Amino acid sequence: MSKTPPPDNDLTLVLDIGKSHAKLVLIDAAGEVVARQVQPNQSAPGPGYTALGVPALEAWLLATIPELPRRRAIRRLSITTHGAAFCGIDDAEGLVLPPMDYEWDGYGDTRAEWQALADPFEETGTPFLPMGLNAGLQLHWLQRHHGEACARVQHWLPYPQYWAWWFSGVACSEVSSLGCHTGLWSPTKADFSPWAHRSGLAARFAPIRRAWEAIGTLRPALAQRLDLPPDIQVMAGSHDSNACLARYLRSDPNALVLSTGTWCVLMAPGASVEGLDATRDELVNVAVDGRPVPTARFMGGREFAVLCGEASPALATAEALAEVMREGWKAVPAFAAAGGPFPGQRGQVFKRGVETTIDAVPHKLRPALASLYCAEIIAAMVQRLDPRAAANNLLLEGPLASNAAFRTALVNFIAPRNLTISQDELEGTARGAWLLALPRTAKPGLKS
């Protein structure tokens, strides 16, 4: 019978891959960060498309993990990544087809072809999104343009599970990534979508495991190369926004959770999936325990950066926000083309009702204006997703949680609803992944 390791000899390594950066976070049994490494993500040329930079990330992991402190005390590895990414593998070659970068947009006539074949929004909760944000479109394109390679694929894996396989050699799938605006999943049926079955894709996905399940241990050769204990448990892993949500599903099950980063993702597990508007980037996400979750999104981090320009986000103070309001500055959607609640609109900037340009905004005020803009968009999303439940908390996670101008504006926009700001120095995605890996019979925020 194995003994429980002491707290100082019981670490979890979290691999958190976002669209802009990948992070390795080493966390002790008390939840404190022991070490943290960050690597910018860059796309790479794929076979006729832009791919995610998997080789560069692999090289970074191979170089960085052996330098981590106290790495011999690591007991488990938990992985969370962004959505809209799938990898094709087989036993002989490993990665047969690299995952497509969802910002590549070379689908041509294949887009209309796939949309004609795909199931309706009522079945999948998946709106037709721009670029490659529908991963079902990506796989359809690959089947049409790389049929020979697709025929060699033994398993399709969501992106978190690709990395779980890379570490462990065990192939699996998981519902929060399968149900992340892919068109591959029917949330209310908890099964692959009819189109996924008709296309033959459903049969090619690896078996489904829960995000918090240990699927295996490290590949022996990899453990030796990384100077890690060979018995580290590798968890199945999850979609990043749903890792963030998982920590709250039991403690505050009706709360809205706002995860901020490149994407601002608003999830309302206590709201109804009826009445969602696919044209406004509203959709049905799937939580790690399988429940359908009404969700709204926009590319808030990208739009914030456009409005900030070269100005430091640290300038987004409550005082700067007050000056923005006094001077009558206002920005209206949208400053990114990737979805959101106001599709097809061109971003504009006004001063006291007269249109001007972003460059006309004083440098010191641009971050506060960007914060005001993001707060207004999110408040509109909250009202649409959960219009009659002002008693439900809004929980704020991610970079915008430390933005004073944003917090001040959002509190006013959503009143009387309460805003709860995460005080955790660790981002919600990594914290959620850590919690999912904890060796407990009843996981925090999860149904057993």
Image (cartoon, rainbow, N blue to C red):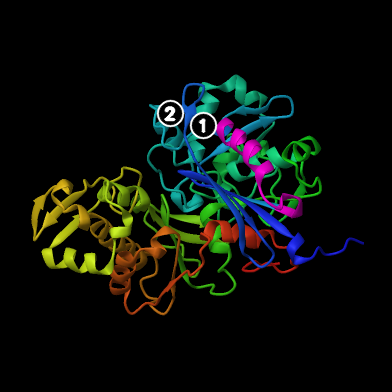
**Residue 287 visible within the image:** no
Q: Amino acid at mark 1?
A: His
Badge 2 marks a residue whose secondary structure is: helix
Q: Residues within 10 Å of mark 2 (few under 14, many from 20)?
A: some
Residue 28: numbered disc:
none
**Seen in the image, is 203 located left or right of residue 215?**
left
Badge 1 marks a residue whose secondary structure is: helix
Give residue 322's quadrant in the image: bottom left
User: Mark 2 or mark 1, which is nearer the start of the sequence?
Assistant: 2
**Seen in the image, is 54 located left or right of residue 68?**
left
Q: Residue at x 62, y 41 (%)?
A: 64
Q: Amino acid at mark 2?
A: Thr
Q: Is residue 148 above or below residue 243?
A: above
Quadrant of the image containing the N terminus: bottom right
Give residue 414's quadrant in the image: bottom left
Farthest-out residue, top: 148
Label 1: which residue? 140
Farthest-out residue, right: 1
**Residue 403 visible within the image:** yes
Image coords of residue 65 (percent x, y): 66, 43
Image coords of residue 23 (percent x, y): 55, 48
Q: CA distance from mark 1 to mark 2?
A: 8 Å
**Which range is magenta?**
55-76
Viewer-closest of 141 and 245: 245
Task: Find out whether residue 51 is within the magenta segment.
Answer: no
The secondary structure that most of the magenta stretch takes on is: helix
Q: Are marks 1 and 2 in contact (CB under 8 Å)?
A: yes
**Seen in the image, is 215 located left or right of residue 58?**
right
Count of marks, rendered view: 2
Residue 110: numbered disc:
2
Q: Residues within 10 Å of mark 1 (few under 14, many from 20)?
A: many
